[in-house]
Image: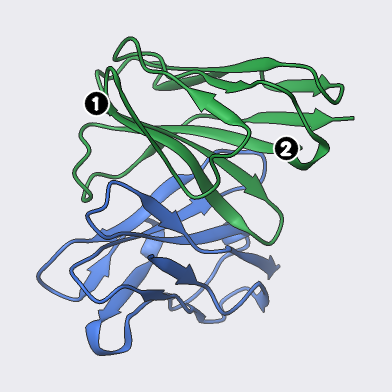
Amino acid sequence: AQSVSQHNHHVILSEAASLELGCNYSYGGTVNLFWYVQYPGQHLQLLLKYFSGDPLVKGIKGFEAEFIKSKFSFNLRKPSVQWSDTAEYFCAVNAFTGKLIFGQGTTLQVKP
Amino acid sequence: NAGVTQTPKFQVLKTGQSMTLQCAQDMNHEYMSWYRQDPGMGLRLIHYSVGAGITDQGEVPNGYNVSRSTTEDFPLRLLSAAPSQTSVYFCASSSTGFSNQPQHFGDGTRLSIL
């Protein structure tokens, strides 16, 4: 069965610091990968997605993620975070099973 | 445009009561799904549907029933509520069941079972 693991459960950064959130999945075949964000009191929104092609994908609000197939990883990055990036971030994987499986989530707190 | 609409937004139930959480989408999406969100556990898939008349189980289906009689609606039923079902429930939809389609989420239903 596919599973997703996010290593960082709670991250605290100061504004302008760089961000990297780890995501690993366990599935040996072709996968589609997503990062979603949930701002306080809101529903989940899509940040970015990877299906094929260039393993470095860019999303909204300056976020990007790199797919490294050999490491089964899809880490999220942002060079300089802002206070408005405070939110919960979820990595998700769909391995052509009809099921989108989420990681446990990472809470990001950005201090002004 | 409404997108994915969930009702109610909040609900308190007593153990053993039954309830239906409503989900409707107006985007003519084929694929719909239900998740529950619990602290430290992310979102876990309860049930999903790839089209009207077709449903299947997700990661945590026990205690929940679904049906999909129309493209627009995908209600989630709790037949006999238990405290372990206290959670925030999200409904989501996507245009097709293909795995590369992003999900559109509703605003959630916060459910407490006493």
Tell me the chain of label 2.
B
Q: Chain B shown in which color?
A: green
Q: Amino acid at mark 1?
A: Glu
Q: Which residue is mark 2?
A: B85
Q: CA gap, disc 2 to disc 1?
A: 27 Å
Looking at the picture, how far across and down is residue B68, in whole percent?
37, 17
Tell me the chain of label 1.
B
In the picture, measured across the screen, residue B10 lies left or right of residue A93, that is: right
- N-term-proximal mark, 2 vs 1: 1
Q: Check disc 1 and report its element: helix, strand or loop.
A: loop
Residue farthest toward the left in the current orientation of the protein: A53
The answer, for residue B6, to whether it is visible in the render is yes
Judge by depth and name the residue closer to the eye, A81 or B42.
Answer: B42
Judge by depth and name the residue closer to the eye, A61 or A75.
Answer: A75
Q: Residue at x 33, y 14 (%)?
A: B26
In the picture, measured across the screen, residue A79 lies left or right of residue B99, that is: right
Q: Amino acid at mark 2?
A: Gln
Marker disc for residue B21: none
Looking at the picture, how far across and down is residue A44, in whole percent?
50, 44
* Quarter residue B10 falls in: top right
Q: Chain A shown in which color?
A: blue
The answer, for residue A75, to whether it is visible in the render is no
Q: Residue at x 29, y 18 (%)?
A: B53
Looking at the picture, how far across and down is residue A37, in whole percent?
50, 53
In the picture, measured across the screen, residue B52 lies left or right of residue A24, that is: left
Q: Residue at x 44, y 75 (%)?
A: A23
Q: Which residue is mark 1?
A: B30
Residue farthest toward the right in the current orientation of the protein: B114
Quarter of the figure with the C terminus of chain A: bottom right
Check disc 1: other Cα within 10 Å, few if <14, some if 14-19, many if 20+: some
